[in-house]
Amino acid sequence: MSDEFELMQRLDVQLSHVWMVRTFLKHSDEAEEDEELALVHRRLYDFALALGGHLKNDDAAGYIRQATKKWRRLREANELFLEIQPEISNHTNFKMAATSLNLAVTEIGRLLGKIENE
């Protein structure tokens, strides 16, 4: 197995967490009422959508290239959600979604070499 293929698989594991948070946010009543929250779940969707075809075709190089290209928007969506989450809801579900998204996005950044290992 190539290093690129292994990296794609590791990234995709983290993307599964991003996808679950996106699904939770999309189907929350709060997303219908808050434009910033809707923007977060749309950006998470856009990131996943950009990678899906590459994964399906086992195109590791394309997957990594696209993930790197879309990284900034994913990071910004995460930062926005962390900022607005306390205003949107202090319910445990939202707190856990923020923690989960932040961990997954941080690991994606590390895997892409955008965040240094601590």
Image (cartoon, helix red, strand yellow):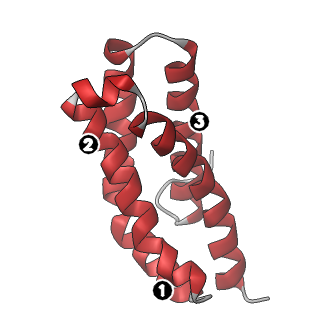
| Label 3 sits on residue | 100
- Spatial distance from mark 1 to mark 2, Cα to Cα? 25 Å
- Spatial distance from mark 2 to mark 3, Cα to Cα? 18 Å
- Spatial distance from mark 1 to mark 3, Cα to Cα? 26 Å
Q: Is residue 35 left or right of residue 23?
A: left
Q: Position of residue 112 (x, y in %)?
A: 52, 66
Q: Kindly indicate the quadrant of the structure image that contains residue 4.
A: bottom right
Q: Which mark is residue 39?
A: 2
Q: Residues within 10 Å of mark 3 (few under 14, many from 20)?
A: some
Quadrant for the C terminus in the image: top right
The answer to the question of whether label 2 and label 3 lie on touching residues, with beta carbons closer than 8 A, is no
Q: Kindly indicate the quadrant of the structure image that contains residue 3.
A: bottom right
Q: Is residue 118 left or right of residue 69?
A: right
Q: Position of residue 82 (x, y in %)?
A: 40, 28
Q: Given the image, on which type of amino acid does mark 3 rest?
A: Ser
Q: Which mark is residue 62?
A: 1
Residue that appears at 48% across and 86% down: 62
Q: Position of residue 96 (x, y in %)?
A: 58, 25
Q: Residues within 10 Å of mark 1 (few under 14, many from 20)?
A: some
Name which of mark 2 and mark 3 comes first in the sequence: 2
Q: Residues within 10 Å of mark 2 (few under 14, many from 20)?
A: some
Pick the residue in front: 55 or 27: 27
Q: Position of residue 33 (x, y in %)?
A: 23, 24
Count of labels in the image:
3
Residue that appears at 35% across and 61% down: 46
Mark 2 or 3, which is nearer the eye? 2
